[in-house]
Image (spheres, rainbow, N blue to C red):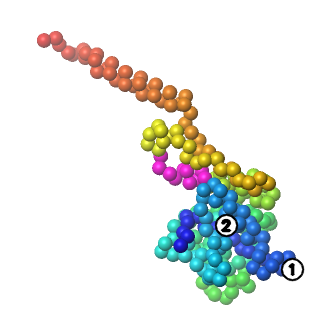
Amino acid sequence: GYYTEHILSYATGNRKGIDDEGCGEGILYAYNLILALYKAGIACFSGLHVPPGKDWKTYMLRLEGSRSKAKTLVVVSTNAFYHSKPCLHEVAAAMEAKCLIDVLNYELPLPLKKDQWPLKVIGQDPNDELMSIDVKKRINRVNSYPPPPLTFLTDPNAMNSFVSMMVERLDGIKKQPTNTNTLLEELRPSISGDGGGGGVVAPVHTQIQPNRIWLLLTGLIMVVILYSGFKTVPTPYSTTP
């Protein structure tokens, strides 16, 4: 099975009379986002990874199964998302798994909190209604990105900025290097996408500059010299035999 720490949630958003059955803008948004993360070396699982003919609920195993590794849920925020019962369950499962939730603005304006996941969508099951209350409280507290009124469709830097943030977040949780050679290593290569504005450039991890290393070494040498000098100076109370 394909289990990753980063899970993507999206709604297809089929537009009647425009999109074929089972298709919608949400698929395109999700595909581009997954591709951008992949180019930066970040594995991500979504409903697009579920093979045709397989039950979509196998997706939920990545969030709540015994083999789940989920740490982050990336939400493709569209109008359709807040009218999708499966998306409601996905966010609820991520909350239960204590995942960090990133909300990415693809469409604005969005439904008001009171209009998200209405009863006509979730049905009459009181458990689902209670779930929707908890999910709405959580997801509406998240600072979405990019900040409104910008979206991924209107801000040309949104994709690169988000991918860079994910790279920095992952680098930040790695163990601190223990020697100078490791510190000088390039932790992540520069990755260029294809032309046409669809490429993603992951930033090269900041390296320690050589002059800073010399300053550090010089300071250590001075400390050793001073310490050695103090050891050789006799104390006032010493006597000559």
Amino acid type, mark 1? Gly
Q: Residue furthest left?
A: 241
In the image, which disc is placed on residue 17? 1
User: At numbered mark 2, what does the secondary structure look like: helix, strand or loop?
Assistant: strand
Q: Is residue 172 left or right of residue 135?
A: left
- Along the viewing direction, whichever of 174 and 117 lies nearer the viewer: 174
**What is the span of residues highlighted in magenta in the rendered image?**
167-176
| Residue 142 on the magenta segment | no
In the image, which disc is placed on residue 75? 2
| Residue 169 on the magenta segment | yes
Q: Main secondary structure of the magenta part?
A: helix
Q: Is residue 61 above or below residue 218?
A: below
Residue 151 in view here: yes
Q: Is residue 158 left or right of residue 49?
A: right
Measured from the top left, where is residue 25 in percent x and y? Answer: 78, 70
How many dots with numbers? 2
